[in-house]
Structures are given as C-alpha cells and as structure tokens.
Amino acid sequence: MFARPLGRIALGLALWAAAAPPARALDSLPAITVFAAASLSESFQALGAAFEAKAHGHVTFSFGASSLLVTQLQQGAPADVIATADETTLAKAGDLIGAPRTFARNRLAIAVEKGNPKTVQGLADLARPGLAVVLAAEQVPVGKYGKEALAKAGVTVTPRSLEPDVKAVLNKVALGEADAGIVYATDVTAAQGKVDGVEIPAAQNVSANYPIAVVKKSQSAEAAQAFADFVLSPEGRTVLARYGFAAP
Amino acid sequence: MLEARLELSLGELELRLDLSVGAGEVLALVGPNGAGKTTTLRALAGALRLDAGRIALDGRVLDEPARGTFVAPEARAVGMAFQDRLLFPHLTALDNVAFGLEARGLGRLAAQARAREALARVGAGGLAGRRPAALSGGQAQRVALARALVLAPRLLLLDEPLAALDTLAREALRDELRRQLAGFAGATVLVSHDADDAKALATRTLHIEAGRVES
Amino acid sequence: MSRAPRLLLVPALVAAGLIGVPLVALVVRAPWPELSRALAGDEARNALGLSLVCSLSATALSLVFGVPLAWLLARVDFPGRRLLRALVTLPMVLPPVVGGVALLLAFGRRGLLGGALGALGIQLPFTTAGAVLAETFVALPFLVVAAEAGFRQIDPRFEEAAAVLGAKPGFALRRVTLPLAAPALRAGAALCWARALGEFGATITFAGSFPGRTQTLPLAVYLALEHDPDAAIALSLVLLVVSVAALVALRDRWLGA
C-alpha cells in the first residue's frame, strides 16, 4: 500500500539531486564558516556570493544575535570569522579572536507597518499610549542602542515585548502584531517593502560600529583572513553600501 | 409479567422471538453460542433497540418501534447479572452492589446499608470490602447477583450465571440461585448454554438457535 | 538468562546515557557559588512564577477541553474522525515557532479571528493569556493522545452495564468511565504539563517576551545565555529541579495500573 507513493518520492528525490548544481571544485581556498549578526543577514549573503565567485572558496553563514554568537564561540562552536553589531560584544570574545577591525556603521530607524497607518513620525510618538511597540532586549546590541537613542530623545517607552534579536522585532512589525519597533536602518531596507521606515534624526540616533575579526583557532586561517579582507575592501564596501551600511 | 415480541438484526444474527414470563416464573433460554441469547437479554434490558415488535413489563411498554416508544435502560425496572460478571474493578464489592441504588438517586449511606443486606442474603456478607480482583469466580458471581437483586427489579436477567466456575463452586451457586429465585417475586429470564443448569433452575425452558426457537 | 536481554542492554544504556549525561553535566558544571546570586534576582523568581502559572493553566485548559475531545474520538464513530485525530496531533510534529506563527495568523491583530476578538476587547499576543494559549496549543495533543488511549482500553461493556444498572450517561461518565481512565488521564496530564513548562518557540513568537508577563523560564534562559551564561545555567537547574520533583511525585500513578 505504501510502495507506490514511496517509489514516487524516491524518484522525485533522485531527480532533484541530479538537477542540483554540480559540486563546486574547491580550488585554492578551503571552506569557511562565518558567524555574523542578524542585521548582516542579507548583506553578508551577498558578500559571500561575491567572495565565492572571486576567490572560489565556499562560505557558510550562521546568523544570530551578536551576543549569542559570541557565547557559542566561547563554548567552542567552530567559526572562522566573526562579525558583530557592536564592539563591546565582540570584545567579550577576548583572545579567541585576532584584532577586530570596524568594517561598517549602521544607524537606527523605526520600523512601522506598511503605509504607516498609526502615523509614527519619531521616537516621541513611541510613548503614545495604545501604540504597540516592540524592542529588542537590552542584552542584544540593537536593544542597547535603542535604549540609548530613547534616552537621548528623552522618551520613555513601555514595550509589549523584548525580543531576542533584531529580526524578531522586524517580524512582529511585518506581521502586523506591533505598530512600531526600533531596528537598524539596514533592516528596513532589507525588508523590501514589507515595512516602512521612519528616520531618527542624527541628534537622537546612535551609530553602531560593526567589527569583524578572524577566529584564532580557525582551521582555514588563510581563507578566513581573505574573507575578512574582502569585507573591508572597496568592493566589499560597495556591497555593504547597497544594503544601507555606512563606511566605517 | 413480561410480554415480549422481539424482532432484531445484529450483524449476522436475525432475532425473532416471542416471550411470555409470569411473576415468579423462571424462563431459561438455552442454545449454542451465537444463538442470540445474550442479544435477547440486552434487548430486554434496553441496551439494544428493537427493529420491530414490543416489550411490555407489568403492562408498561418499554420498547415499541411502531409507536416510537423507547424507555432508556436506566429507567427500566430491570436487574441484570452480566456475562463475565462485569463487576466494576475500581469499586469494592459493597460499592458495586450499591452502584445501581446510587445511580437511581439513593444516598450513599442508605445505598451501602441496603447493599450490605443484599450481600448477606446471597452468602457474600464478608466480602463487602474486597475488590473484584480479590474475589474467586463463585464469590464474584454472588456479588453480581446481589447487585441485580438489591434493585428489587420487576424483571431479573441472568446471563450465564454458572459459567467459568469449578464444580464445587458451581454446585454451591446453583443451590444459592435456586433459593434466591424461589424468593423472587418478579419474572426471571435466565440464559445458559448448559441444558442441565437450565433444567435445575427454570420453570420453563426455550431452546433457541440462530435467533429463533428451535422447532 | 537467554541471549536476548543481554543484547538489549547495550542500546538501553545508550538511550539512558543520551538523556542522562547532559543532565548530569548540567548539575556537575553548575557554577554553584554564583547560583544564589543568579537566583536571587527578580528575573528568576518572575520567570519561575510565570512558568508555573502558565503551565498549570495550560494543563487545566487541556484537561477541560481535551478530555471531552478524547472521549469523542474514542467512543463516537463520526465521519472525519481520523482526520480530526490527525489534526489534533499535528502540533506535536509542527516546529513550535511555526505553531507560534499560525497562532498569530489566527488570533493576532490581523488574524482570522483577531478582528472579532479585538471587537470584544480581547487581546492575546503579548499577554500572559497569549502565553497560556501558546503552551496549550503545543501541549494539548499529548493529553488527548493519552486520554484517548485510556478511554479505548476500557471495556465498553462496563458502560453498558452501568446504564442497565440505572446510571444516566452523566453518572456513568463520572463514576465508571473517568475513574477507569484516571491513570491514563493522570499520565497524560503530567506529559502535558511537562511539555507546557518547557515550551519556547510558540510562546516567544506569539506572546513575545516581557519580564513578569510573558517571559517564562525557557525564554529567560535563552536570553540569559546571551549575556550571563551562569544565570542561564542557574535558571535551567531550577527548571530541571521543579520538573524532576513533579515527575517523581507522579511516578506511582504513572507506572501504576
């Protein structure tokens, strides 16, 4: 009774495997694993593709909250390169990493529902009673920055939730559950129209410096260094700019 | 007084039976397995509905499909000792016997008092606090009998009351049953696959096979 | 002793080890000196209290609504029964976060029923009630599965006997069916509670995370892991101790017939 459907599934799998792109011939550089902050998801995937096309090494990414990535690194997770959304977090990695270099800067923005139905115009509006605001937890870089920005603007906000990373904040807004959330400007760009962004003026805004470092215990130190250098190169900077990051 | 004309289809069994049992009478239904004996009792008890026919007990119609009359089993004045006893395993013998009384609205203490008397009357007085798992076949059968009799029913239904008992217990229980039936004022329908048991206990015997009286 | 038992010993030990070693490691590597500091804070007490309230509420809801459903699946033959049973067990195989998204799409502001709920003044996301709902969603199937099995193994002739003896359906349910199913129901409730207590993905997606309101113990552990691993281990140990204590207390009922 199950033979026929199983047969069809097996056939399907075989065809799918055959149609997959041929395995890339590993040339000079071996494969590397890159840990990167959640806000770098889209830009780093583009950088990875460009790096692979250029240097023929294979890059695998693991995206997540910067603080979580550093903890994982400390617990021995295998990574060759790590890039976080703030310098303090990366510093916690201590002598597990080589000298960090700042490769980009990001700024904060307010993500709102498409069309901005609640007409949020600035940080002050986030204190509006009845507005569903979602922030990232303080332990996460964007949460810390958000708190700083709110303090600069002299605004007190009672959020509905303190999310564990910036993408979670964005998702709550994109799904329509929250009216507004503080995210990075790049996240608004990356959301591709699912949310609208409200600018935060420079006086209240916080600049996030993104550092990148090579992990000392890396098995592919040469490839790791090559990737880090690529990110810092003018070509890398162009890619990052496309996603809304400012030069360091 | 029981007057019943039974017409019922259950699976492959086609039951067509006419019964008439007077007060104090004991009718035995004898036949092989699958003959429809238990089905008959279930229909009389109300666990099964007739397809056609009529059941009347002391003039009260319990089941008549043609008129749309059906009295639910819990509302019939019927006491039944089931095949395999079916004593509730989570209750003591006393609570088992008291069950029907409590179900019909009697308070717990009053029900237990009457249950104690009923157990004593069938010679199972010392078993009140025991769980069914701790009873022998003969003992369980006495409790099941007490459970039916305590309700003072107008119709007593006994399904294979002497089955699965060793010879000694069987003889003792047969005597006990004879005593109880002699003192019972209502009508009794008794089911057995053993013709000798039937002869010993019944005033009348009906042989049925494949749902009908054997001609 | 025949060969078979000895052969089974090896995989059995591996299974025990797979579960046992990480748990032992948690206890052995716990930063005992720092624990009291980590646990003294409001965060830990809030999270534990909230976790207990939510998981017990979820279990209560599961019992109230799940037992009747299980009875229906076990005793009534209706068209679509198998489909309903499959549907009810679906949350068991669904990734919890997907469950959370589904809950948002159903009960969120823009959800299928969101508008209606909003009109009644009921808001579920970002509330404790929402956390309870998320936990119930993932834990209910465990209770239903156990309860249905419990009802099925009761000889239906007992219920018929009860009726013939004079029990109306409600009386029979209370005095015969439920008591006979009780061991299975208790085991199901224990599983349900344990699942609800450990729930993370659906809760954080649907209810969000806010201390004292929706930040249950698993969410607190996840957040603590990022900036204070010692606190994370401390909180995990609390969860472990509470769970073990409860499961041990239920042990007799669980294993008893």
Image (cartoon, coloured by chain):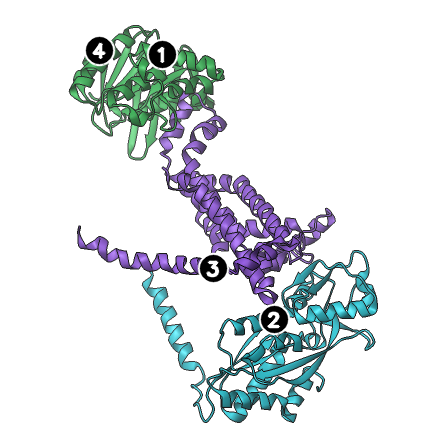
| Chain for numbered disc 2 | A
Residue labelled with disc 1: B118
Chain coloured green in the rendered structure: B
Which numbered disc, 1 or 3, marks the residue closer to the eye? 3
* Callouts 3 and 4 on one subunit: no
Q: Residue at x 74, y 69 (%)?
A: A146
- The amino acid type, in three-letter code, at marker 2 is Ser
Q: State if disc 1 and disc 4 touch (CB < 8 Å).
A: no
Residue labelled with disc 3: C26
- The amino acid type, in three-letter code, at marker 1 is Ala
Residue labelled with disc 2: A67
Q: Give how far apart the Cα atoms at labels 4 and 2 are.
A: 86 Å
Q: Give how far apart the Cα atoms at labels 1 and 3 are.
A: 62 Å
Which numbered disc, 4 or 2, marks the residue closer to the eye? 2
Q: Where A109 falls versus B32 (above or below)?
A: below
- The amino acid type, in three-letter code, at marker 3 is Leu
Residue A19 horizontal/vertical position (percent): 43, 81
Chain coloured cyan in the rendered structure: A
Which numbered disc, 3 or 4, marks the residue closer to the eye? 3
| Chain for numbered disc 4 | B
State whether residue C77 appears in this view: no
| Chain for numbered disc 1 | B
Residue labelled with disc 4: B175
Residue B184, quarter of the rendered image:
top left
- The amino acid type, in three-letter code, at marker 4 is Asp
Which numbered disc, 3 or 2, marks the residue closer to the eye? 3
Q: Where A18 falls versus C200 (above or below)?
A: below
What shade has chain C been given?
Answer: purple
Mark 3: secondary structure: helix
